[in-house]
């Protein structure tokens, strides 16, 4: 199985920081700034984990999660969310193959949660 991670975040700086942090720890990371880019990269079985920002400014990220579920139901998705968006995450947790991390978070905390699911 691939060790490739799909990272989707519209914040370029955060995307680069997380991507570099994970790459320094041996992960291969494909980065997308929006749902359209992410779906162009997505191939069933290609990724081991999708790390998706559930940003307040982009409710389309939940549509992305549904599309990922349709195209690659075995791909584990880790949602990055703020407290204010936490309620909308719960419905996806019930479907399985999904977890979340609350922003702001420490990069080591992200790594611990990822390792729990990889």
Image (tube, rainbow, N blue to C red):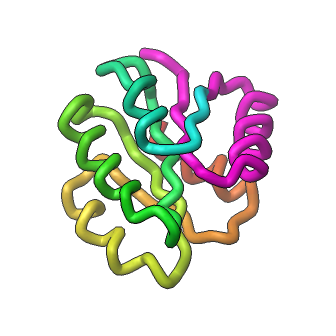
Q: Residue at image x 76%, y 41%? A: 16
Please give the count of numbered marks on the rendered protein: 0
Q: Position of residue 35 (x, y in %)?
A: 43, 43
Q: Nearer the viewer, residue 58 or 2?
A: 58
Q: Nearer the viewer, residue 40 or 106?
A: 40
Q: Quadrant of residue 32?
A: top right
Q: Residue at image x 58%, y 42%? A: 33
Q: Is residue 76 visible?
A: yes
Q: Does the magenta portion include 18?
A: yes
Please report the bounds of the magenta region as a residue range: 1-29
Q: Residue at image x 78%, y 39%? A: 21
Q: Is residue 115 visible?
A: no
| 20 lies above or below 1 | below
Q: Residue at image x 72%, y 47%? A: 12
Q: Is residue 111 left or right of residue 56?
A: right
Q: Nearer the viewer, residue 68 or 110?
A: 68
Q: Position of residue 68 (x, y in %)?
A: 29, 38
| 79 lies above or below 37 | below
Q: Does the magenta portion include 34?
A: no
> Which quarter of the image is occupied by the N terminus?
top left
Q: Position of residue 54 (x, y in %)?
A: 47, 62
Q: Is residue 48 left or right of residue 97?
A: right
Residue found at the far bottom of this picture: 84
């Amino acid at each position: 199985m691939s060790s490739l991670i799909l990272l989707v975040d519209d914040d370029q700086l955060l995307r680069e920081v997380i991507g570099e942090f994970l790459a320094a720890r041996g992960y291969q990371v494909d980065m997308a700034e929006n749902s359209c880019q992410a779906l162009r990269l997505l191939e069933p079985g290609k990724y081991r984990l999708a790390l998706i920002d559930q940003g307040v400014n982009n409710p389309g990220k939940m549509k992305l999660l549904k599309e990922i579920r349709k195209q690659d139901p075995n791909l584990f998705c880790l949602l990055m969310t703020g407290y204010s968006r936490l309620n909308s995450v719960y419905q996806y947790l019930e479907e399985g193959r999904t977890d979340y991390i609350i922003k702001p978070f420490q990069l080591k905390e992200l790594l611990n949660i990822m390792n729990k699911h990889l």
